Image (spheres, rainbow, N blue to C red):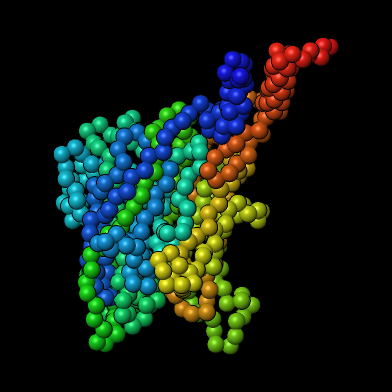
Amino acid sequence: MASNNPGWLVLVGILVTLSLPYSHAFWGNENKIHTAVFLSPKFVLGPGSVENRFYFNVDFPKGHIALKSFDAEVIDEAGNPVPLHETYLHHWVVVRYYVRKGVEISKLDDLKKVNRSDYISGGNSGICQNGILSQFFGLGSETRKTSTHIPDPYGIEVGNPAEVPSGFEEQWMLNVHAIDTRGAEDKLGCTECRCDLYNVTVDEYGRPLRPYYKGGLLCCYDRTQCKVKHGFEAVRRTLYLRYTVKWIDMDRFVLPVKIYIFDITDSWKRTPSSTEINAEHKCKIEYDIESCDATGLGNDGCIDTKRISLDMLFGGYLIYGVAHQHSGGTGSALYREDGQLMCSSLPTYGKGEEPGNEAGYIVGMTTCYPKPGTVEISEGETLILEFNYSRIRHHTGVMGLFYVLVADDLPKPMHTLRTVVQTQDSIMVVTVLWAAVALIGVVAVIALAVHYQFKREGEDGYEAIRM
């Protein structure tokens, strides 16, 4: 039998090795993916009320690791997902920071009292100024059906002891902005933070709003109240943001990626008198969409298109991209200056009532995963960012953010005769040399089988055919 032929085991081992994914067969790495599910601090909402708080030192994986994904959704006390037409998730973001050991920060008020020398921002790589849009991950209503997966062999490196300032520790802040729209007089108006529906004339610091400011973040801050229908009543309920983090231990096989966020409201302009890159990227985050005029659709098909040019302060290989839009969004794209498409992201609108499929809401954004090495960004290169919104009705406080992951390096080949095939979850390798080895292995297996069969026949009284 086969057990008496060790060669069979060797050949089977070879064939099994040939079938391994690229990350195992070529990198020799079986880094296990860890998963942890956490809950934000609880928040309580009643009809029309708003939660927009900053939670410091939230639960997060520890150690020198590479993040692979971060997913989140709003749930009730029983753990049931809450639909957007009841509690609208305007956005959530998670931000890294460093705090001096022994200093306690649990909420924004604590941060305001902390000595500036005890707190250091640990945000992403840019490109907005003054810590704006510094999150590592962040989404909104689209969170349930938007992939945040980072393909192998890449990951977002965190917890590197060499990068933590001496005497400090790495911590994480979670911002949750949710609006209870049960019984709202105008659900869409509440989600777009229209100032008249919130009866707000000053911002959260008591400063008067600009006369032309009609809606946005300045009108739906924490503990404001959107207008509900007269006589409507519903219980206040306790909610959480449930977030799921996946990661692997950091090692030499993981290639780190950097996070960049582009904003369509960025007011950056190239300096007329110089070809140098101007680093002043002032991101306003939100803007309004005017409705089509009453005379017809016009030449633009009732679509608002905004385009800006951005000179890149960095270079590298595009690994992942996704846009963030609000209701009315019709898609976004990143182009080279010559018009070549680099990455696009389109919204998915729900068609029902259940969580993840709420009609009229953006419930997902498509993502792009270019084959490694096919989309390279050169330092100093000019890219074009485009965002599109429907103008069928007026929109306030919409956003146009584009989140990208960029790697400095590509996976180093372990053999010159190979073709890399990229998929979202793994990199499979096909090589001429290995195919030849596989063929030899199969032939050897067949030869051994024939030899063994002839030997058995000879033992049973039949003369084997001799060559």
- Residue 340: x, y in percent? 65, 53
Left or right: residue 128 versus residue 406 is: left
Quadrant into which the C terminus falls: top right
- Residue at 33% from the left image edge and 69% from the top image edge: 87
Residue shown at the point (23%, 56%) measured from the top left: 41
Identify which residue, 117 or 225, lies in the foreground. Answer: 225
* Quadrant of res 460: top right
For this orientation, the residue located farthest to the front is: 461
* Residue 369 vertical placement versus 308 (above, below): above
Q: Residue at x 25, y 48 (%)?
A: 58
Q: Relative to 453, does residue 118 appear above or below in the rendering?
A: below
414, 273: nearer the viewer: 414
| Residue 248 seen anywhere in this rendered image of the structure | yes
Residue 250 point in image, percent of width and height: 40, 32
Q: Is residue 246 above or below residue 109?
A: above
Image coords of residue 331 (percent x, y): 54, 64
The total number of labels drawn is 0
Rendering coords of residue 13 (x, y %): 58, 23
User: Is the residue 189 above or below the residue 442 in the image?
Assistant: below
Pick whichever, 135 or 424, lies toward us.
424
Residue 284 showing in the rendered view: no
Say left or right for 267 vs 131: right
**Residue sitting at 58 percent across and 27 percent down?**
17
